Image: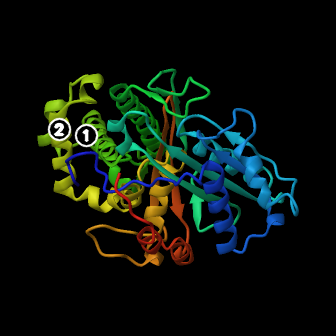
Amino acid sequence: CNKKGLGQKQICFCGDQEDVYSICLTVTKSLMEKYNITPDMIGRLEVGTESSLDKSKSVKSHIMQLFEDSNPYMEGADLIHACFGGTAALFNAFDWVRANPDAGLALVVMGDIAAYREPRARPTGGAGAAAVLIGPNAPIVFEQNRVAFSQHVYDFYKPALSDEYPLVDGPLSLACYLRALDRCYTRFADRMSAKEGRPWTLASADFYAFHTPFGKMVQKAFGRLHLLDYLRAVRRGEEHPHADLLQPFAALPDEEAYTSRDLQAAAFQAMDRDGSWMRQVEPSAVVPRLTGNTYCASLYQSLASVLGFVAHKRPREDPASLAGKRIVCFSYGSGSLSAMWSFRIAGDITPLAERLDLPARLAARHGAWP
């Protein structure tokens, strides 16, 4: 993996005639047309965003322009908590479909415009939206294993109601992200070990998709998981393939480990040695590297990157060969809320990959220099 800079090649931005309402309307309309979904098929519409231009009226109510003449009876509203709102909406939608199997499909829309006042922070911005359709007999299955971690912290927040720009404590936010990852992965691994009757390790999943404020953050996160895996192996009294690299950091306090460049270097070396980055994370990193930080949509663009199988420095694989593969997801929203869970690909996702058409859509964007 590229160890220099922010790990970004490009970011997306909107013109002055676009806003969060227009991009969410666009992605909703696109999904419905591509999958021949009619308004009467939707029973719930939920939105995750932190970019609404109104402190009362929801983005969901704007999207209802596509439905109000044919189906004004859908449940759902906006969910707001930094970058976690989309995941909260997704969880609500999953639970609603499970509890109401005859009430129709659920549609979850995540969209944000990530803008920063300080010029030096703007390379970590971006803009984008994602739409997810939830219902029975889907080719991607939500596994019953989600875990969550929450805490009260001011690492990123927007206290001025008339100002779109956040106040950000960058170093604190990075530490909060990694701390949440620690707590979620530890609980997730414990739960999966008990459920499957064998120790969970990083190799137990085929792919990992992360909330991606910038590419380097995901590299640090996956490196952190390598250290956690090593520490879990030590506690089990087992050997670990990267003990020679990671043992010197076994006793390092977490708060020091989060910023240790020596540890990062050792973790990157472990990823290069076993090829785990290219095999398990790179497929999910391609799209975020080209779109930037899309807040609530970020994790789901990472997921789309895997499902569309846009790959970098590796051959494009047949999407049908993904059947049975497991994708572990980590969602984080400053403040902070976080969760980890997994999807299982249950069948042929070729039709989904064809409709995503990620290479062509990314290539069709208009380029501009800042």
Query: Residue 146 has which mark?
Result: none
Residue 77, image x and y in percent? 74, 43
Residue furthest out toward the front: 16
Residue 254 seen anywhere in this rendered image of the structure: yes
Give 198 or 105, whichever is nearer the viewer.
105
Identify the colour scheme used: rainbow
Residue of label 2: 246
Give 263 or 191, whichever is nearer the viewer.
263
Real-space Cα separation, disc 1 to disc 2, in angstroms: 7 Å
Residue 241 seen anywhere in this rendered image of the structure: no
Report the residue at 56% width, 23% height from top.
159
Residue of label 1: 230
**Where, by quadrant of the figure, is residue 1 drawn?**
bottom left
Give 264 or 225, whichever is nearer the viewer.
264
Mark found first going from the N terminus, 1 or 2: 1
At label 1, the amino acid type is Tyr
Dot 1 falls on a residue whose secondary structure is helix
Residue 281, image x and y in percent? 34, 56
At label 2, the amino acid type is Leu
Residue 66, image x and y in percent? 77, 61
Dot 2 falls on a residue whose secondary structure is helix
Report the residue at 43% width, 76% height from top.
321
Relative to 240, 11 lies left or right: right
Q: Are marks 1 and 2 in contact (CB under 8 Å)?
A: yes
Relative to 65, 288 lies left or right: left
